[in-house]
Amino acid sequence: MSTKPSKNLETFPNPCPDRDYEIAFDCPEFTCVCPRTWQPDFATLRIRYVPDKLCVELKSLKLYLWSYRNEGHFHEEVTNLILDDLVKTTRPRRMSMEGDFYIRGGIHTVVRASYEKGKSRSSGKP
């Protein structure tokens, strides 16, 4: 496996597919840049999911998150984009994503998004 930033998320088979259980990741070192000023934005990402057949492999998740470091994204966009990519890759029963962005210009932003298998979004994405 590479040690460079990558958009490639890898998976492994869920070892307990007959049971609902939650996997929780806290990622306190997420960075991207503001698409208007190109100044860095820092966040803690909180990912929670109940796997179905697949689980996300952690090193690939780390390299995936690292790939956003020099990309310009609004907080709302990047939180939903990461959730969509994780859902597409793992097809979980449920997943939630929280982007807790550090204070910038006196404003603290928290973006929450979620997915539940069998419920559709108006945009037609998973």
Image (tube, rainbow, N blue to C red):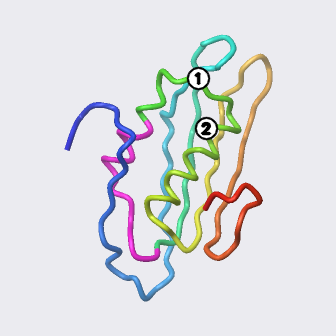
Considering depth in this image, is 12 or 119 the residue closer to the camera?
A: 119
Considering depth in this image, is 102 or 116 the residue closer to the camera?
A: 116
Residue name at image x 76 percent, y 31 percent: 108
Relative to 76, is 18 on the left or the right? Answer: left
Q: Circle 1 — which element? A: loop
Q: Earlier in the sequence, mark 2 or mark 1?
A: 1
Name the spot of residue 125 as percent of width and height, x first. Answer: 64, 57
Which residue is situated farthest in the right direction here?
Answer: 106
Q: Residue 117 colored magenta? A: no
> What residue type is disc 1 on?
Gly
Q: Residue 54 colored magenta? A: yes
- Quarter placement of the N terminus: top left
Q: Circle 2 — which element? A: helix
- Identify the image quadrant of residue 105: top right
Relative to 124, is 57 on the left or the right? Answer: left
Instruction: Name the residue that disc number 2 marks.
Output: 78
Residue name at image x 65 percent, y 39 percent: 100
Which residue is situated farthest in the front direction here?
Answer: 124
Residue name at image x 55 percent, y 61 percent: 48
Is 88 located above or below residue 15 in the figure?
A: above
Instruction: Name the residue that disc number 1 marks.
Output: 72
- Identify the image quadrant of residue 47: bottom right
Name the spot of residue 26 as percent of width and height, x first. Answer: 50, 49
Q: Which residues are magenta?
A: 52-65
> What residue type is disc 2 on?
Val
Relative to 27, is 46 on the left or the right? Answer: right
Disc 2 from disc 1: Cα separation: 9 Å
